[in-house]
Amino acid sequence: MRIPFTKMQGAGNDFVVLDETRGLFGLQREHYRFLANRRFGVGADQILTVGPAPAPDIDFSYRIHNADGGEVEHCGNGARCFVRFVREQGLTAKCSIRVAVQRGVITLHERPDGLVTVDMGAPLFEPAALPFVPGSLSCRQQGEAPLWRLSPMVNGRPLAVEVALACMGNPHAVLVVNDVDAAPVAALGAAVQALSCFPAGVNVSFVQVVGRNHVRLRVYERGAGETLACGTGACAAVVCGIRMGLLDTAVRVNARGGMLHIGWSGDNAPVLLTGPAVTVYRGEIEFPDPLPALPQESFQESPP
């Protein structure tokens, strides 16, 4: 089977984008894993699929698969690439589109300056929304945010950490650190993801507060490992920082792959994510038959 694809990136978070508006390719989990593999396939953090509109008031559907082939709920950086893709491919002439994702509908807007703003919807904080099962875990309050005390196993020993939680269409645990460059992102991120209190897994954001309008961020994502940027992770980090009393309502986020801008006015207001979306190249790929067995460690190489 041979299919066309487009390689895109948003702040270094890279994607393979597929157009299924005219028909399904019939891909299975192992096909997405192959596409994402940086040694055997195209290479990407995630695979984005553009689908036909599921209802008259919606323009497209949007599916996301991680590098391990598993489908996930949302991707903010991918959403920016999504609107750039459908406009470049002539699938729509609209600057603003409504797109169905796994947990609802989001609005995407391409600005005259070339940046893209995504209305990410209102964040959710109830444990069931992530889901998060606290059991006997304790928490303390900082501002409006409960900070949950966790003890993930790192290098064979329990490490005490506190996390704030937010659901941006997908689950996030946010840790405030003094120096994001020194944070043990891979080891601690994987350990937090493995905790039984997160039955669907969790994305783990490590945020360093530089000022009330500026943070630095690294994110360890489910099914992908650390990525150069994570849109929903940036949103979750800023929202939790605002609730903790550390940040104002408009914040620039320095990820390793570039700059993102997040705005949130609180309560049930939507989170607005603004950043770049770039087409890298287009091509076609032939899936070998049978597909090769891919080692787990080759799905994703950690950023430098």
Image (cartoon, rainbow, N blue to C red):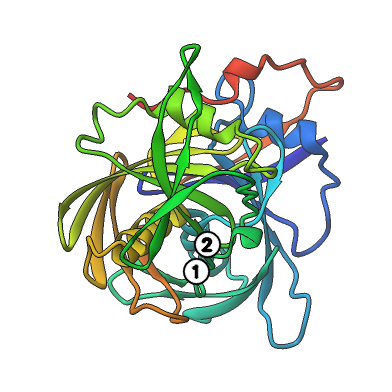
Q: Give the farthest residue toward the left.
A: 211
Q: Residues within 10 Å of mark 2 (few under 14, many from 20)?
A: many
- The amino acid pointed to by label 2 is Met
C-alpha distance separating marks 1 and 2: 5 Å
- Residue 193 vs 90, above or below: the answer is above
Q: Is residue 277 visible?
A: no
In x, y percent, where is residue 78? 52, 55
Task: Judge from the rendering whether residue 295 lies leftward or rightward of residue 45; answer left or right.
Answer: right
- Residue behind mark 2: 168
- Residue behind mark 1: 123
Q: Residue at 69% x, 31% y: name it.
A: 33
Q: Which quarter shows the N terminus?
A: top right
Task: Judge from the rendering whether residue 38 lies leftward or rightward of residue 148; answer left or right.
Answer: right
In x, y percent, where is residue 231? 43, 55
Q: Nearer the viewer, residue 174 or 10?
A: 174
Q: Nearer the viewer, residue 29 or 3?
A: 29
Q: On the image, which quarter does residue 104 sit in?
A: bottom right
Q: Give the farthest residue toward the bottom.
A: 57
Q: On the image, which quarter does residue 61 sit in?
A: bottom right
- Residue 207 vs 298, above or below: the answer is below
Q: Residue at 52% x, 69% y: name it.
A: 87
Task: Judge from the rendering whether residue 87 lies leftward or rightward of residue 112; answer left or right.
Answer: right
In x, y percent, where is residue 48? 62, 51
Q: Secondary structure at mark 1?
A: loop
Q: On the image, which quarter does residue 243 sit in?
A: bottom left
Q: Are marks 1 and 2 in contact (CB under 8 Å)?
A: yes
- Residue 188 vs 162, above or below: the answer is above
Q: Which quarter shows the C terminus?
A: top left
Q: Residue at 81% x, 42% y: name it.
A: 27
Q: Residue at 35% x, 48% y: name it.
A: 11
